[in-house]
Each structure stands twice: as structure tokens, then as C-alpha cells.
């Protein structure tokens, strides 16, 4: 529950920082971005487009989760289609929702990387928008 509240707060901060003074309007996708964070034992704050974390024993799990969330959308009726850019496949468990979790490990190529893209569709107008973010998880111990 704590992680969900922190996620929502961080996503809201990211969305507001990208569009100061621009209130979201119903069906408005112009401010939509993809935020991410790599889950550690610290207070993780979602960042727009790119996020980064370093693994050290006792400070995070390895592997851990990279969390992605659409931020900056106005109220509306949307669908979400996720793509793992590295594997060109749909990430498991993401489905038609505004958030997605992908496992990430420093043991992959010595440093972890996860890039996801989401296609957002406004179901009332048919308009679409793509957003992408990359999470990096580096080994700070070995």
C-alpha cells in the first residue's frame, strides 16, 4: 500500500513538473509521459522518461522491479498497450492498465536496463499517443 501511495505522489509530481500551469483537460493526451522508478529500500520517486538506481547489498533486492506509469493524462476513457522495446514483446502482466512492472537485474550484461513503450488510445476520440521510458539498474558493489 505504501508503494502505491508513493508511486501516485511521484507520478503526480513528475506530471506537474513537466507542464506547469497547464491543467489537464478531459481527453487531453498532450502532457502524457511515461514515468519510472527502480524499486529499492529508499524512497523511490518516479521520473519522466528515464530513471536510474544502483544496487548495493542491503539497499535493494537484485533482481528487483522497474515500475512504469503513465502520468499527465486528463480525465477520460483510455486504453493502454505496452511493448518491451528490448524483446519486441508485450510485458507479462501489464495488460490494459496505466502501470506496468518489469523485473530488472544488475546481472544482465552487468547492468540492468528495461525500456518500455506504451500506446495510449483515447477511446472516445480514437486519438493515440506513444510514450516511452528507460529504467537503468547498475551494480554499485562489484
Image: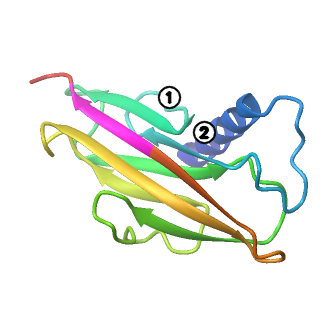
Q: Looking at the image, which is closer to me, 56 or 66?
A: 66
Element at label 2:
helix
Magenta segment boundaries in residue numbering? 134-139
**Going by the image, does 27 lie left or right of 57?**
right
Q: Number of marks in the image? A: 2
Identify the residue at horizontal 79%, vertical 71% (top origin). 77
Q: Residue furthest top?
A: 141
Secondary structure state at the residue bearing disc 1: loop
Q: Position of residue 87 (x, y in %)?
A: 28, 64
Q: Is residue 17 left or right of residue 136?
A: right
| Residue 13 pos. (x, y %) | 70, 32
At x 36%, y 58%, the residue is 85
Q: Is residue 29 above or below residue 96?
A: above
Q: Position of residue 114 (x, y in %)?
A: 34, 49
Q: Give the colour scheme shown.
A: rainbow
**Mark 1 surroundings: few (<14), some (14-19) or many (≥20) residues within 10 A:** few
Q: Are marks 1 and 2 in contact (CB under 8 Å)?
A: yes
Q: Earlier in the sequence, mark 1 or mark 2?
A: 2
Q: Which residue is mark 2?
A: 6
x and y percent of residue 48 in the render? Answer: 57, 37
- Residue 30, placed above or below residue 43: below
Q: Nearer the viewer, residue 2 or 112?
A: 112
In this view, 59 is above or below 70 = above
User: In the image, what residue occupies the spot 78% across and 34% down?
Assistant: 19
Q: Quick one: label 2, few (<14), some, or many (20+) residues within 10 Å? A: some
Residue 54 sits inside the magenta stretch:
no
User: Residue at label 1?
Assistant: 43
Q: Main SS of the magenta segment?
A: strand
Mark 1 → mark 2, Cα distance in angstroms: 8 Å
Q: Residue at x 26, y 40 (%)?
A: 61
Amino acid at each position: 500500500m505504501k508503494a502505491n501511495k508513493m508511486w501516485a505522489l511521484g507520478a503526480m509530481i513528475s506530471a506537474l513538473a513537466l507542464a506547469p500551469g497547464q491543467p489537464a483537460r478531459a481527453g487531453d493526451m498532450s502532457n502524457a509521459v511515461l514515468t519510472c522508478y527502480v524499486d529499492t529500500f529508499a524512497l523511490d520517486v518516479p521520473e519522466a522518461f528515464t530513471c536510474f538506481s544502483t544496487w548495493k547489498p542491503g539497499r535493494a533486492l537484485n533482481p528487483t522491479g522497474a515500475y512504469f506509469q503513465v502520468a499527465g493524462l486528463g480525465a477520460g476513457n483510455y486504453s493502454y498497450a505496452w511493448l518491451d522495446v528490448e524483446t519486441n514483446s508485450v510485458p507479462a502482466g501489464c495488460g490494459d492498465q496505466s502501470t506496468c512492472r518489469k523485473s530488472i537485474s544488475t546481472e544482465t550484461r552487468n547492468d540492468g536496463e528495461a525500456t518500455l513503450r506504451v500506446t495510449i488510445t483515447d477511446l472516445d476520440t480514437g486519438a493515440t499517443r506513444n510514450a516511452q521510458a528507460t529504467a537503468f539498474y547498475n551494480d554499485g558493489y562489484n
